[in-house]
């Protein structure tokens, strides 16, 4: 039987609200990108350098997803050559305490992490 969707604030449970946050913030690269952007706007190449192991293609896809979800805004800087800059939106800034808290928790408990299969 399919799960009923929450349609009003009264329908939301704490688990449902947590699931919404995880959908918006989850993924291998999103948290690191948000942490980088928490330090201010960044260009694509800067984000690439600050995110070891990510490919250009995956970075572009993750930034597009963050932009689509309203966490990040993309702007073209009119210089020659043209550059693209990414910055947190108000929605993205609102998520930063959660992102920083999760990062701190991960740092405290990294020794418990098991390698991914």
Image (cartoon, rainbow, N blue to C red):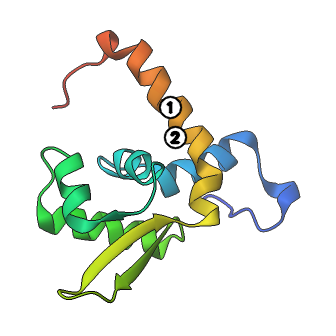
Residue found 41% across the figure and 23% down from its top? 106
**Image position, residue 33 (x, y; %):** 36, 52
- The numbered mark at residue 99 is 2
| Residue 45 picture quarter | bottom left
- The numbered mark at residue 102 is 1
| Residue 7 picture quarter | bottom right
Q: Say which quadrant the C terminus sits in.
A: top left
Distance, label 1 to label 2, CA atoms, is 5 Å
Q: Are marks 1 and 2 in contact (CB under 8 Å)?
A: yes
Residue found 30% across the figure and 50% down from its top? 29
Tell me if residue 42 comes above or below residue 83 in the rendering.
above
**Image position, residue 4 (x, y; %):** 68, 61
Tell me if residue 108 comes above or below residue 29 in the rendering.
above
Furthest residue toward front: 80
**Image position, residue 90 (x, y; %):** 64, 64
Mark 1 nearby-residue class (10 Å; few <14, some 14–19, many ≥20): few
Residue found 84% across the figure and 59% down from its top? 9
- Local secondary structure at mark 1: helix
Q: Is residue 2 visible?
A: no
Mark 2 nearby-residue class (10 Å; few <14, some 14–19, many ≥20): many
- Local secondary structure at mark 2: helix
Q: Taking 14 as reference, is 41 left or right?
A: left
Q: Say which quadrant the N terminus sits in.
A: bottom right
Q: Taking 41 as reference, is 47 left or right?
A: left
Furthest residue toward right: 10
Q: Taking 49 as reference, is 27 left or right?
A: right
- Tally the numbered discs: 2
């Amino acid at each position: 039987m399919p799960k009923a969707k929450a349609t009003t604030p009264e329908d939301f449970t704490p688990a449902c609200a947590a699931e919404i946050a995880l959908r918006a913030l989850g993924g291998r690269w999103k948290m690191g990108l948000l942490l980088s952007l928490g330090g201010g706007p960044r260009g694509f190449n800067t984000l690439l350098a600050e995110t070891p192991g990510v490919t250009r293609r995956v970075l572009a896809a993750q930034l597009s997803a963050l932009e689509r979800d309203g966490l990040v805004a993309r702007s073209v800087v009119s210089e020659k050559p043209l550059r693209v800059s990414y910055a947190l939106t108000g929605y993205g800034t609102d998520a930063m305490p959660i992102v920083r808290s999760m990062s701190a928790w991960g740092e405290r408990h990294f020794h418990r992490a098991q390698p991914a299969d």
